[in-house]
Image (cartoon, coloured by chain):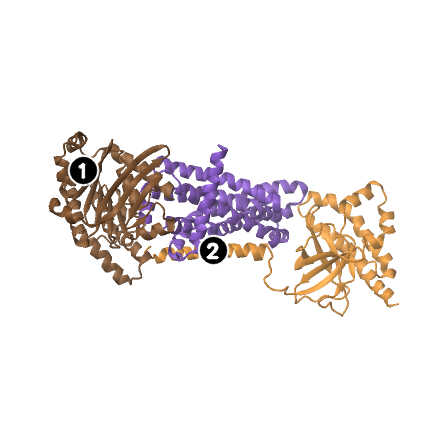
Amino acid sequence: MSPSPVRDFIVGIFVLLGLAAVGYLSFSVGGLSYAAPAGFTVYARFDETGGLKSRAPVEIAGVKVGRVTGIVLDENYRARVSMDLEPELKLPTDTTASIVTSGILGDRYITLQPGGEDQLLKNGDEIAFTESAIILERLIGKLVHGSVGDESNGNGGGDGSSPKPDAGAGAAADGAATSSGSQPEATPAAAGASTGTGSQPEAGAAAKSEGATSGGSAGRGGTAE
Amino acid sequence: MAMPETDREPELHVALEHVLVCFGTREVLRDLSCGFRKSRISVILGGSGSGKSTLLKVIAGLVRPRKGRVLVAGEDLVRLPERQLYEVRKRIGMMFQNGALLDSMNVFDNLALPLREHRKLTPEEIATEVHERLEAVGLTNVDHLLPGQLSGGMVKRVALARAIIARPEILLCDEPFSGLDPVSTKRIEALLKTINRRYGMTTIVVSHHIPTTMRMAEHVLALLPDGQVEGTPEELRASRDPRVVNFLNEDAGDTPGLADEVEVLPTAGTATRRMG
Amino acid sequence: MIVAFVNELGELAVFTARILSALLRPPFRGRLFVDEIYKLGVLSLVIICVSGFAVGMVLALQGYNTLVRFGAEQSLGAVLGLSLIRELGPVLTALLATGRAGSATAAEIGTMVATEQLDGLRMMSIDPVDYVVAPKAVAMVLVMPLLAALFISCGIFGGYVIGVKLMGVDAGNFLTSLEGAVDFHADVLGSFVKVIVFGVLIGLISTFRGFTSAPTSAGVSFATTSTVVVGSVSVLIFDYVITALWGV
């Protein structure tokens, strides 16, 4: 019954420690946001998200710049992904969003490839150029049937980048084909080395950057006409 | 001293009517009727397993009889719900055999607890009350000792002080002399008498210590294997009843048996479970 | 056997109702409550943190060795975080708390029964359920989430030390994978729900066993042992049921 200040102090410390741990798990690890998303939201449509999850990271050059906040199906049966990005981030309107995989079996996440436009993406804008997730099984299937090149050319719009700009579709599909073509080759190498994650998106990104930028400007030209 | 007073005996403060107490299938008290008068010192005598500690717990409301009535200051404990039982218990103080002091708190807090719980007193008033009771049992400078640091005799005295802290009308003492040396026994005996006179509490003592009992009691209830006998100590001594004669002679030379103390514990526990 | 079991469940239900009614009535015993948090929480802190750290280290080691075969060692953070938060954290914390705090509670109350301290309280017109049992049971429920959170945090730290410092997983990857895989609503919230259920279980079982123990040393020892046995088994059963029904 008699109050003992030392014990009370220790109990206080214990409770604070415990609450700090609860807070760490909830806010830092669990990603609970106590306020409205701090940054700005952009959208992107994909034909295939391949198991991308809500709260997956959004990266530029491997640096995390935001999170996926929601994935819904739109009226054309495509996935509409919303992303919450850091407020100070300045992205040109011709930025490309791609769904990639960390490791071979790892989690899906989104990388952004900023373009060269002067105009910037605003809150609520949609990223026009997207690259869908690569489904490993389908790729292996194509490889086994020896039709990688034909297939990817055939449905380049569906498999690869944004189908919206028709004129750019060819170029973009080429880029996509290159990137998907490089995928199986990069894979065995990635499996051996522990730096697999690094090599895979880079291979994709490298292949992409040429196709996307050229395809992107071509595409814009196409829409303008 | 007892004879002239029989004409104007004080009213019954505690009365039991046809009480039956069972633990499982074993009947501990069967068809027991007895009464204890106001402001008197009454002693319940009995051998091991005679149910005398149980009887005390029945009066305290800790054991609920299966049949009969237990009237304490006019209230029938058998029919009272648990919540109201706590109200009746505010008028009863109980000194347990082993003290039953809360061992997580010191002597002062042990005594102050009922005052803090039930009365709106300032800390100064509480301290005054506590020290007054501790002095009444002849203890000073024990405030900050834990029950574990007290000697057997001191535990009994602290327990007695706690039993009377709230100035109850009825004081129940379970084996106040067990496990004590003759000097401490005399001291507790004197204390009980003084307290009885000073506060006018109806005092009911359970004991198997016959010499002390005969000295202090104004009224004796002897629980014998085949029935009970009531009367003043003089009446009991003068009795020609072979059972009484036997009992008094048998136990007169005996020191309190160890068997009895072992016996008391399970009884207490069953009581706890029953009353929850 | 079955009758006895049902009987005991009934007693437990009545006991629970009494604790709840004691909580609803004033006074609120803040002082006792703080003491109980000290006994149940602070005194369990060392074993919880050390165990959490050790479990995190072992998980990281085992997880790394398995993941590296599939080239997915970058997902170590996710594996560690999810298994700790969803399953191991709540269950191991509950088992440790049963052994440390639950047994201590049962032994303490059992001893109070044996030494008539509870009867002593009754004679002072203080309900022992209100004064002794309720603060312990409630403190157990409130302390459990804190202990589990500390266990999990220590586990993540232990895993980080092994995975990043020893096995050379990239620190950024480890944390990104951890934070990307764990969702507050799906994982963390479920973890806390579990751990609070376990806290209720342990709090009830330990106080009930102590309160109904036979007033002998054998009785106290039985109360302590059965708290640990019954507590652990019911934690595991409830863990399965919660996971199966709500998938957390």
Q: Amino acid at mark 1?
A: His
Which residue, given by chain and number where applicable, does mark 1 sit on? Answer: B209
Image coords of residue C61 (percent x, y): 57, 42
Residue found farthest to the bottom = A119
What's the chain of the residue with tag 2? A
Q: Splitting the image into 4 quarters, where does residue B47 fall?
A: top left
Residue A184 placement, left or right of C15: right
Chain A: drawing colour:
orange
Chain C: drawing colour:
purple
Q: Amino acid at mark 2?
A: Leu
Q: Secondary structure at mark 2?
A: helix
- Examine the rendered structure and indicate whether residue A225 appears above or below residue C203: below
Residue A124: numbered disc: none
Chain letter, colour brown: B
Residue C126 placement, left or right of A38: left
Q: Which residue lies at the image location 86% right of the left edge and 65% below the top edge?
A: A223
Residue B54 placement, left or right of A86: left
Image coords of residue A114 (percent x, y): 74, 62
- Examine the rendered structure and indicate whether residue A121 appears above or below residue A178: below
Residue B197 placement, left or right of C77: left
Q: Which residue lies at the image location 67% right of the left edge and 62% below the top edge?
A: A84
Q: Splitting the image into 4 quarters, where does residue B214 fall?
A: top left
The N terminus of chain A, quarter of image: bottom left
Q: Few, some or many C-alpha atoms within 10 Å of disc 2 (few <14, some 14-19, many ≥20)?
A: some
Residue A8 visible here: yes
Q: Secondary structure at mark 1?
A: loop
Q: Few, some or many C-alpha atoms within 10 Å of disc 1 (few <14, some 14-19, many ≥20)?
A: many
Which residue, given by chain and number where applicable, does mark 2 sit on? Answer: A17
Q: Which residue lies at the image location 47% right of the left edge and 35% below the top edge?
A: C4
